[in-house]
Image (cartoon, grey):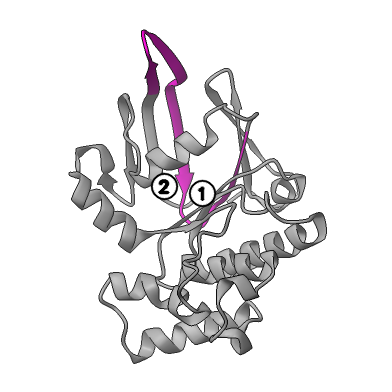
């Protein structure tokens, strides 16, 4: 396996609910290599989304630490975590999260604008991504004019446009029909391979599991790791 991109050590997440505490997971360890495609499995409420939020720095662990691309997120200020996330991480959400008042092109270019990287080369790369996802002719369309599958294709391109080292996908096919979901998963997997990013996907989809390099399964607050027999371990 290549050098690790994500390292989690002793992660614990506890939420306080009134006088009670809810332990999401405790003393969780994980190591994820560069360029890996990880499928993260577990029942609803098992901690999949919480783990993604901690890896991205959106949320902080109660205890333990997580390093992403050499940065210790827990030791960064909220502003520094936001800047790190903006520069190094791409997101694909279940409900697309496109900005409805922006066109397809404007949604795609937003991460580049936020990073101050909207130059001619970046615009060309963005156009190439739209071509790759089959939406080069929809640059002026607004999200409400697109189907769910088309919106998710835009979201995939947006997640990759700033060339992040890590892409986090949270149930990216959960709002799509079965056939469209398979097409979107295949596209995301192909573009992940081509871009050389690390992809961590929280999912219930068997199709996603079959495409992944490795499966991490939540079991009573622990992560069990297994290589996918359909792909070659790195």
Residue 166 image point, x, y percent: 44, 56
22 magenta-colored: yes
Query: Within 10 angstroms of label 2, few (less than 14), some, or many (20 or more) residues?
Result: some
Q: Secondary structure at mark 2?
A: strand
Q: Which mark is residue 117?
A: none
Q: Height in image: 206 above or below 190? A: above
25 vs 116, left or right, is right
Residue 167 image point, x, y percent: 48, 56
38 vs 71, left or right, is right
Q: Which mark is residue 1?
A: 1
Q: Are marks 2 and 1 in contact (CB under 8 Å)?
A: yes
Question: Residue extending furthest top?
Answer: 19
Q: Which residues are magenta?
A: 13-41
> For the residues marked 2 and 1, what is the alpha-carbon distance in whole angstroms?
8 Å
Q: Would you name the residue on which mark 2 appears?
A: 4
Query: Within 10 angstroms of label 1, few (less than 14), some, or many (20 or more) residues?
Result: few
88 vs 40, left or right, is left
Q: Residue at x 40, y 64 (%)?
A: 164
Q: Residue at x 38, y 38 (%)?
A: 54
Is the stretch drawn in magenta largely helix, strand or loop? strand
């Amino acid at each position: 396996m290549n050098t690790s991109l994500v390292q989690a050590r002793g992660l614990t997440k506890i939420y306080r609910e009134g006088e009670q505490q809810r332990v999401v997971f405790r003393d969780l360890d994980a190591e994820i290599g560069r360029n890996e495609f990880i499928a993260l499995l577990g029942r609803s409420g098992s901690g999949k989304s919480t783990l993604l939020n901690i890896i991205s720095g959106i949320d902080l662990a109660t205890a333990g630490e997580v390093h992403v691309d050499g940065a210790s997120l827990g030791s960064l200020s909220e502003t520094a975590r936001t800047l790190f996330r903006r520069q190094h991480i791409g997101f694909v959400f279940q409900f697309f999260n496109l900005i409805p008042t922006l066109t397809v092109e404007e949604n795609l270019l937003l991460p580049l604008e936020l990073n101050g990287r909207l130059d001619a080369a970046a615009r060309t790369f963005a156009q190439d991504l739209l071509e790759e996802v089959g939406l080069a002719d929809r640059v002026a369309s607004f999200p409400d004019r697109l189907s769910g599958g088309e919106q998710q294709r835009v979201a995939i391109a947006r997640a990759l446009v700033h060339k992040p080292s890590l892409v986090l996908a949270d149930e990216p096919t959960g709002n799509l029909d079965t056939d469209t979901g398979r097409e979107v998963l295949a596209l995301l997997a192909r573009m992940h391979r081509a871009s050389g990013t690390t992809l961590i996907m929280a999912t219930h989809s068997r199709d996603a599991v079959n495409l992944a390099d490795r499966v991490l399964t939540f079991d009573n607050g622990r992560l069990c790791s297994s290589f996918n027999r359909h792909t070659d371990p790195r």
